[in-house]
Amino acid sequence: MAENIIEIWKANWRGNLRCHALGALILCAVTPFLFDTRGLDAVSTAKILECYLILMGIVCLVPVFLPDQDHAIRELLDTKRMSPAVVCAVRLAQSITVLTILTGGMLWYLRENGCEFPFKMYFAGSMAGMLFVGSIGMIVFALTDKMPLSYMAAILYYVIDTGGGKKYLGNWYLHSMCEESFQEKWYLFLTGAALIGLALLCRTYAGRWHFGKRKKPSQIFRIRAGMGG
């Protein structure tokens, strides 16, 4: 089991997450060129985190199910009798690990530049926002198997939040730390966790991957043999 998890981790990094992690890293790298990052107060620091770096959640979490669109990967999972839930959970853990490292690194950078803010609270709040906005894309992808639509759904929520603000979204407002409020982050975290869990269930039991009867490994081998493979 441990060997399978390691193989999934390596394969997902090489074939999927590496490019998206690079995109998230670039978002972090260009931050000093887009914003003043020296000597900021807590509110100004929150604006960088909630108005810009929160996009890393979309970049890293939405593609968790992307490899499943490859029919060869689906057949491989069938022949090895791997649970899709385990595979997707490992990919999810890897994406969250990347977000944790990048978010922690950016907060460290801001603090070293003289920004004053509660480190632990801002780290937790940033992760909650990223998980939530990423979970929107994940659940859409789990139900539709359409990557562009998944990105659009997550970005649309971000745009609505930026334009409409707390008046329309209430406790699911993404920019609450900019207004010195942390309560909304609990709603974002719990809702995001629920949507991610639901997305995993959909991909495991009711997603397009499993619509209809799955072929048994023996059936797959017979098909290949009949094709001369």
Image (cartoon, helix red, strand yellow):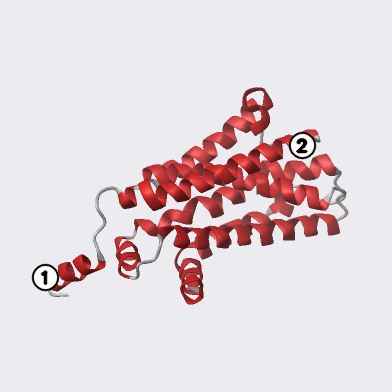
Nearer-the-camera pick, 179 or 127: 127
Q: Is residue 179 above or below residue 223?
A: above
Residue 157 located left or right of residue 79: right
Q: Position of residue 59 (x, y in %)?
A: 55, 52
Residue found at x 59% / y 49%: 57
Q: Nearer the viewer, mark 1 or mark 2?
A: 1
The residue indicated by pointer 1 is: 226
Q: Amino acid at mark 1?
A: Gly
Left or right: where 113 falls relative to 191: right
**Quadrant in the picture for the C terminus:** bottom left
Residue at x 42%, y 41% (from the top left corner): 149
**Secondary structure type for disc 2:** helix
Locate residue 220 relative to residue 8 in the image: left or right. left
Name the residue rendered at 61%, 47% in the picture.
131
C-alpha distance separating marks 1 and 2:
62 Å
- The residue singled out by tag 2 in the image is 178
Say whether residue 147 is visible. no
The answer to whether 17 is drawn above or below residue 207 in the figure is: below
Residue in the foreground of this view, choosing between 17 and 78: 78
Q: Position of residue 169 (x, y in %)?
A: 63, 27
Q: Quadrant of residue 93?
A: bottom right
SS under mark 1: helix
Label 2 environment density (alpha carbons within 10 Å; few <14, some 14–19, many ≥20): some
Q: Earlier in the sequence, mark 1 or mark 2?
A: 2
Residue 43 at what x, y percent from top left? Answer: 81, 39
- Compared with 77, 55 (above or below) is above
Please name whichever residue, 75 or 10, is drawn nearer the observer in this view of the structure: 75
Residue 85 visible, this orientation: yes
